[in-house]
C-alpha cells in the first residue's frame, strides 16, 4: 500500500543502496525521477495508438488505447498505480500491445481531472504530490471501480481491434490491485486472466475485502508481491492462496525478493528492472495460456 510506512521503507532501501548518509540522500532526492526505457519486445508487432474518451455513468474518461495493426487481438484493461495514467504507463501499455494485445490504460481520476494528474518525474515521496493523489484516490470507491470496469469493458468489446471470441485480461498496480479483483468479479464471463503487481489491500479483515470476491470470478491470477508489503502483512498471501484454492481457481502468488512496493513502473524510484522483467514474463505466460 502507498502508506507512510511503505514510503519510509522505500526511502531507506534506496538510501542504503546509494551508500549515502540520510542527509546526502535527502538532497539527492530533490532531483526529478527519470522514466527508464523498457527492454524492447522481441518480434514486436506494429501498433496503432490513440487517446480516446469513454462514456461512463459518471462522465467521460480519458484513456490510452493501443493495439496491433494486423488484426483483432485479446483485450487487456490496465489499472495504473496511485500516480495515474502518465508516460510510464503509456510505455507499458504500448509494450504489451507489441506483444499481441489490444490494451486500454485508463485514467482512474477522470471524475476530477484529465491525465496526467502529476508532472513527468513526479515522486510519491514529494509531500505535495502525495497529498494530491491521495485526495484523488480517496474520491474512488469499490462501487465506482465496478461501474468503471463495466463501462471500459463494454467499450473495448465494441472495438474492431478486440477479439471478443477470446477472454480478456486485466492488470493493476498498487491501488489498481483491488480494482483488478473487482473487475474480474464484476464481469466474470469476460475476464479470463488477471494480474496484480505490488497490489495493496487485497486481503483485509474488512467486509468488502477484495479477496472475498474470489468465488464470483472465473479468471486465472498472477499476484506479484513486494518484499516490504509482505513484511508488513505476511498473512495476506496465505489468505489469498486459501481463497483461490477453495474456489478452484489457479493463482500464482509470489513474493519478489529485493523488490520494494512500486518496483514495476519504469518511472518509480524503486524500479527494479530484473524483478520487473520477471513479473512481466510471468504475466505474458499467464495471458498466453489463459486467453488463447
Image (spheres, rainbow, N blue to C red):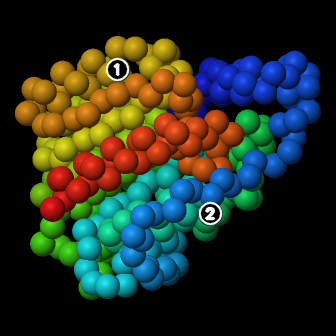
Of tags 2 and 1, which is closer to the observer?
2
Label 2, label 1: how far apart the Cα atoms are: 31 Å
Which residue position is annotated with label 1? 236
Name the mark on residue 87. 2
Q: Badge 1, how many Cα within 10 Å: few under 14, some, many 20+?
A: some
The answer to which quarter of the image holds residue 113 is bottom right
Q: Residue at x 37, y 66 (%)?
A: 99
Q: Tell me residue 206's x, y (percent).
A: 34, 24
Q: Badge 2, how many Cα within 10 Å: few under 14, some, many 20+?
A: some
The answer to whether 199 is drawn above or below residue 203 in the figure is below
Q: Residue at x 51, y 62 (%)?
A: 40
Q: Nearer the viewer, residue 23 or 274?
A: 274
The answer to whether residue 58 is seen in the rendering is: no
Chain-order first, disc 2 or disc 1: 2
Q: Tell me residue 254's x, y (percent).
A: 35, 28
The answer to whether residue 76 is seen in the rendering is: yes
Amino acid at each position: 500500500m502507498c502508506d507512510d510506512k511503505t514510503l519510509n521503507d522505500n526511502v531507506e532501501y534506496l538510501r542504503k543502496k546509494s551508500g549515502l548518509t540520510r542527509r546526502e540522500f535527502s538532497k539527492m532526492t530533490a532531483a526529478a525521477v527519470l522514466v527508464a526505457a523498457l527492454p524492447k519486445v522481441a518480434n514486436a508487432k506494429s501498433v496503432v495508438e490513440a487517446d480516446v474518451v469513454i462514456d461512463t455513468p459518471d462522465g467521460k474518461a480519458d484513456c490510452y488505447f493501443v493495439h496491433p495493426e494486423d488484426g483483432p487481438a485479446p483485450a487487456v484493461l490496465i489499472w495504473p498505480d496511485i500516480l495515474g495514467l502518465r508516460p510510464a504507463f503509456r510505455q507499458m501499455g504500448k509494450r504489451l500491445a507489441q506483444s499481441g494485445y489490444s490494451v486500454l490504460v485508463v485514467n482512474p481520476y477522470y471524475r476530477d481531472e484529465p491525465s496526467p494528474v502529476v508532472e513527468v518525474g513526479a515522486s510519491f515521496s514529494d509531500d505535495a504530490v502525495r497529498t494530491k493523489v491521495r485526495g484523488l484516490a480517496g474520491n474512488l470507491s469499490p462501487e465506482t471501480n465496478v461501474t468503471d470496469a463495466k463501462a471500459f469493458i463494454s467499450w473495448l468489446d465494441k472495438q474492431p481491434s478486440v477479439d471478443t471470441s477470446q477472454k480478456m485480461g486485466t492488470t493493476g498496480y498498487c491501488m489498481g490491485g483491488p480494482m483488478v479483483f473487482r473487475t474480474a468479479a464484476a464481469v466474470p464471463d469476460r475476464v479470463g486472466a488477471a494480474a496484480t503487481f505490488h497490489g495493496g489491500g487485497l486481503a483485509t479483515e474488512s467486509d468488502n475485502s477484495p479477496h472475498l470476491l474470489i468465488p464470483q470470478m472465473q479468471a486465472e491470477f498472477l499476484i506479484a508481491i513486494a518484499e516490504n508489503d509482505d513484511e508488513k502483512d505476511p498473512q495476506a498471501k496465505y489468505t489469498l492462496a486459501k481463497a483461490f484454492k477453495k474456489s478452484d481457481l489457479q493463482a500464482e502468488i509470489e513474493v519478489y525478493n529485493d523488490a520494494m512496493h512500486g518496483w514495476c513502473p519504469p518511472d518509480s524510484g524503486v524500479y527494479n528492472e530484473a524483478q520487473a522483467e520477471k513479473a512481466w514474463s510471468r504475466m505474458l505466460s499467464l495471458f498466453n495460456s489463459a486467453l488463447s
